Image (cartoon, grey):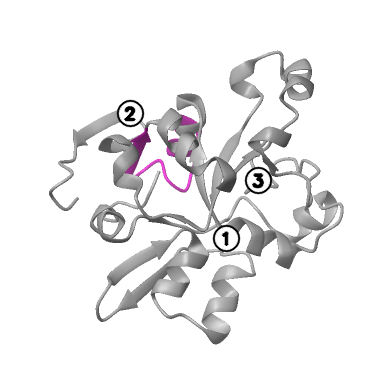
Amino acid sequence: MAELGSWPGIQRHGLLSASALLDLFGTHGDARFAAESEQRKESVRLRHPIHGDAVIRDNKPMDDRGLLRALTDMSPLEWYRSLNGKVFFWLTEARLQTLLQARAYRDRPHCVLTVDTRCLVRDYEDRIWLCPINSGATKPAAAPRGSNTFCRIKDYRFDQRLRITRSPRKSVAELAVDYAVPNIGNYLDDVTIRDQSGIIRTVSRQNAA
């Protein structure tokens, strides 16, 4: 789920993490620290004379107070940087709907990319992380988290999670890829503009959204 209007940039550069976007747009100093190493209370708009505009979304559901309660062996700064270095995918329609219906997003449309997971995992397995929780939220409750929260596929404790959740669909909350998926176009099933009520339109891969 990406910001409306982000599809042309995704076509040109692939699906980029926050850190990869900051690299591409040449963002340094205090502006970079605020976007990458702290809570973003509002979305951050980047502008570049060649690359145009891009938006790094806020991370309002997560804050230092919640992270200090939840983190076991990392600082909030380390956690923010860890998340900002990854590209995130929801694994179920239900989790996507939860985000589409969130207060911050429910009143506007978004660009939704549907990906062929089998092919993505085949090509990116050694760069993929699995996570059992919503890593970008500490509200209303802050689940424990730390350096072992994200695991490579071969190391993920799926059976242990299955005993807790009793549902394969709930046993993995997030899939993340290190830094970027520059060839995301190879894995797309479709690109749609959606809001909380459903699909507004399907986007041609050759046209700007």
Say what amino acid the circle numbered 3 marks. Answer: Ser
Residue 184 shown left or right of residue 199 in the figure: right
Q: Can residue 108 be seen in this view?
A: no
Q: Say which residue label 1 marks.
A: 84
The magenta-colored residue range is: 97-115
Work out how far the residue at label 2 is from the one at label 3, CA to CA, in angstroms: 25 Å
Count of numbered marks: 3
Q: Tell me the residue that label 2 is attached to.
A: 197
- Among the two numbered marks 2 and 3 on one chain, the one whose residue lies closer to the N terminus: 3
Task: Answer with mark 1 or mark 2, whichever residue precedes in sequence.
Answer: 1
**Helix, strand, or loop for circle 3?**
loop
Label 1 to label 2: alpha-carbon separation: 29 Å
> Which one is in front, 161 or 68?
161
Which secondary structure lies at badge 2? loop
Amino acid on which the number 2 mark rests in the picture: Ser
Q: Residues within 10 Å of mark 1 (few under 14, many from 20)?
A: many
- Estimate the x, y position of residue 91 in percent, counting from the top left: 51, 30
Q: Which of 77 and 99 is in front in this view?
A: 77
Q: Is label 2 in contact with label 3 (beta carbons under 8 Å)? A: no
Measured from the top left, where is residue 202 in percent x and y? Answer: 19, 35
State the image coordinates of residue 195 (x, y, percent, origin top left).
33, 37
Tell me which residue sits at (58%, 37%) in the image: 174
**Magenta run includes residue 110:** yes
Depth-wise, is mark 1 or mark 2 nearer the camera? 1
Res 6 → quadrant: bottom left
Q: Residue furthest top?
A: 166
Which residue: 78% across, 52% down?
Answer: 147
Decide: is 19 above or below 50: above
Instruction: Find disc 3 in the rendering and name its residue.
Output: 135
Residue toward you, 183 or 173: 183
